[in-house]
Amino acid sequence: MKGTLLIVDDEPLIRKGLRKLVESNALHWEIVGEASNGQEAIVKLGDHAPDLVLTDIRMPGLDGIQLAEYIHRNRPNTAVIILTGHRDFEYAQAALRFGVKDFLLKPCPEKEVCRILTEVYEQLYARLRARDMQNEERRRMEENVLRSQMLQLPVPPMDAERLTEAYNGMDAWCVCVISYFPKSKAYRPEDLKLLQFSIMNIMQELFEQSGLQGRIVSVQVNQFVLLLNPSQSAHSFFSQLVTIIEELLAIPLFTHYSGRLEGMGALHQMYQEGLEAYDKAHPSSSLQRFTYKQEERMSTAAIEGNLDLNYSSIKTILNEVMSFILLGKSSELQQYAASLVRALQDKPIAEMKLEALTIASAFQETERRELGVSLAQEDFAARVSELHPLQQPAAIMAWTEKQVERFFAEWSRWLMLNNDNLIGRAIRFIEQHYMDECTLAQAAEHVHLSLTYFSNLFKKDTGESFTNYVTKVRVDKAKMLLRNTGMKIAEIAEAVGYADPNYFAAVFKQTTKQSPSEFRKGL
């Protein structure tokens, strides 16, 4: 996941330089536009709604302070970083009241720009992750209330009233599974939850692709209700859904439009209408019903426990995996994946399968989002087909390990494709910082990889260790100074990153078989 960035500066060369810096350093920012002044930036804000604006302070027309004020008042979710000169700094501090995240004092060292952009991205990512968790919790609550209304279970009046405002006027559609056990497939009763999860997963993916707006509610194992904003494309969506589920899982579906929702009290009636329509269309195929005596009706929490499709678990795993990738913690990610597989032990077979598919789905979604891997519904269906016949815990765990290994293989391929860029950036980092401390840890952080992984990757790509490479660069720079200047040995040592001239002389001699003085005399 990348943040979106708008660059605002009246100097084209500065805009070009900032763009090159951001794009060459893999800072998790996507530049969605540039503007030459504040007024132009306001138009671009409307077009792109960026997460961050990086703006100069002095520009013709609307300046950076005025732009920050506009963003503060009209787009509170957009962060601002201001580029400022020494003479503007006190003036720039006025922007603090407009929520400016930070200031960059021109001329800006690349390292400082990268540091601030990384900090702002981490803040953005944390905010989006918290928002996703809140949205997920709200989704679960809403689905519980909607499900309870359909089954005539108790609902807190305030929740019902709030959802009436949100869902009134939506179209209600029922989707029923005609049979989970088609003759062409060897599905077992214990595969019910796995198959339900599969249908929901495919339905959700198609729903997101369709552009429809609304909510999918799993009411019972074989019954779903979709509440949608009215749309002419709804009929084609349901037609496609029936076709795809039949093709991939060989499971037949029945769909029915129950009408437009007018008050939450009508939900139960509309749900029942869908079931009655099914009975009329399939009189010889009775739809399994889950009915309860009044005193034995299940609580909302119990129903949720039975019908929870583990989407919260997918989100949790997905966020954890993406965090490890973002921070370059490959070994920690492998340990986390192994812990997920170990946690499957001692679970009942049906639950183990559902958890295994949850893990596989989370890693598959990471491939799609972070690695750009194109995945089709057929991939998901193939995994279900592999998983459902398995009846031994060891076999299910082995299957899950295979799915995780597939992800790591894909990630390795992705890293290999990007190696040239990563090592190129590391080498540029050395060229720019050899005169400073320039440690392996600093370079690894610069390219967002773990220390161990970066060290191995660097040696594999360059043929030598990071330390030896830095030493070679420093010695080459020292040779150049010895040839072309009259600088003292101690001055040259300091210029190429050695505080101790004696240590510099020892390293130089070990590398060239000559002391610095001998090298200079031999020229």
Image (spheres, rainbow, N blue to C red):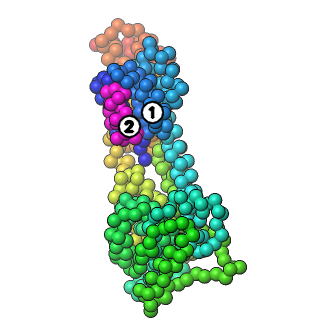
Dominant secondary structure of the magenta stretch? helix
- Mark 2 sits on what residue? 45
Q: Of the numbered discs in the image, which one, if any, rests on residue 71?
A: 1
Side of 371 where 96 appears, left or right? right
Q: Is residue 405 visible?
A: no
Magenta stretch holds residue 74:
no
Task: Look at the image and tell me in which quarter the C terminus lies.
Answer: top left
Q: CA distance from mark 2 to mark 1?
A: 9 Å
Mark 2 nearby-residue class (10 Å; few <14, some 14–19, many ≥20): many
Check disc 1 and give the amino acid type: Ile
Which residue is painted at 53% across and 43% down in the image? 127
In the image, 84 versus 210, the foreground residue is 210
Which residue is painted at 44% across and 92% down in the image? 284
Q: Earlier in the sequence, mark 2 or mark 1?
A: 2
For the residues labelled 2 and 1, say whether their Cβ atoms are less than 8 Å apart: yes
Q: Of the numbered discs in the image, which one, if any, rests on residue 143?
A: none
Determine whether 467 is above or below 354 in the image: above
Give the magenta range: 33-50
Determine whether 405 is above or below 115 in the image: below
Q: Residue furthest front?
A: 262
Q: Is residue 270 visible?
A: yes
| Kind of element beneath mark 1 | helix
In the image, 171 versus 317, the foreground residue is 171
Which residue is painted at 41% across and 22% down in the image? 57
| Kind of element beneath mark 2 | helix
Mark 1 nearby-residue class (10 Å; few <14, some 14–19, many ≥20): many
